[in-house]
Image (cartoon, grey):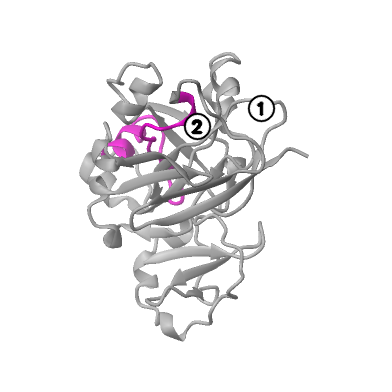
Amino acid sequence: MKLVRFGLRSHERPGIVDENGNIRDLSSHVADIDGATLGDLERLGTIDVSALPRAPKDARIGPCVGGVRKFICIGLNYADHARESGQPIPSEPIVFLKATSAICGPFDDVVIPRGSQKTDWEVELGVIIGRSVHHADETTARESIAGYCVINDLSERSFQLERGGQWTKGKSCDTFGPIGPWLVTSDEVGNVDALSLWLEVDGRRYQNGSTANMIFKPAFLVGYVSQFMSLQPGDVISTGTPAGVGLGHKPPIFLRPGQTIHAGVSGLGEQRQRTVSYD
């Protein structure tokens, strides 16, 4: 299944994508695509999607999961990105948190923060939890994953690296977490370890990677993180980015207002954002 949320910001309705690519309104069956719904995906599989009303064609697409309680990120999870960042390849996953207030829709504007000089891009595979887990082994962890999505883990590098060493400060600005367009359920994704992911700015491709090159794979990451905190349905893990971020160029390249970011992961859809200045 491809699950989606559509409508005005903070008033999104739950939807599902039919076999012809149309968004169908699920609100007669569930209140939202959130933790409660993801914990009962089997029920959604029994619905006659073709009988559901269609969403308006011009409807805004919101973040593909609502009510996120934890937005967890993994740093330096591709060896090529670690090398371009001048960092050693991690022996254990680097875990940090991104504020849930950073979450926005996949086609919403990205706001360059006040005082920013180094806003950067990072296309990533997102993992969305469907069952509560704590101290999970890898098999249990894999079974707890409801699905996957595209994430752009935007970062302000000076806030992240030059303001006391706290990554969260550079990762949590409003609009720095576009999620979606779809939550694609695990059964439909297939081999999650062989997905291509890419990102372009103004038509120039900067990132072109594959999840095959992840250091730590999704199920391992879920189990690892669950050693330190319980994970609940609707929690999101962003699993790291391949090489090609702006910081890795010589000289570095950073985003400025008026640009277009276009990113995608094979089978999970594409995002497109316009960068705007802080008002």
Distance of mark 2 from mark 1, alpha carbons? 20 Å
Name the residue: 29% across, 58% down.
189
Q: Is residue 263 above or below residue 19?
A: above
Name the residue: 34% across, 68% down.
42
Neighbours of disc 2 within 10 Å: few (<14), some (14-19), many (20+):
some
Q: Type of residue at label 1?
A: Ser
* Residue 200, position as x, y percentages in the image: 46, 44
Name the secondary structure under disc 2. Answer: strand
* Residue 91, position as x, y percentages in the image: 27, 20
Q: Is residue 37 above or below residue 192?
A: below
Q: Type of residue at label 2?
A: Leu
* Residue 181, position as x, y percentages in the image: 48, 58
Q: Quadrant of residue 59?
A: bottom right
Residue 79 belongs to magenta span? no
Q: Which residues are magenta?
A: 220-247
Left or right: residue 149 compared with residue 63: left
Left or right: residue 271 compared with residue 80: right
Image label count: 2
Q: Residue furthest bottom?
A: 51
Which quarter of the figure is the C terminus placed in?
top right
46 or 197: nearer the viewer: 197
Looking at the rendered structure, which numbered label has been put on residue 97? 2
Is residue 70 in view from this perspective? yes
Foreground: disc 2 or disc 1: 1
The residue carrying mark 1 is: 116
Q: Is residue 89 above or below residue 61?
A: above
117 or 139: nearer the viewer: 117
* Residue 12, position as x, y percentages in the image: 61, 63
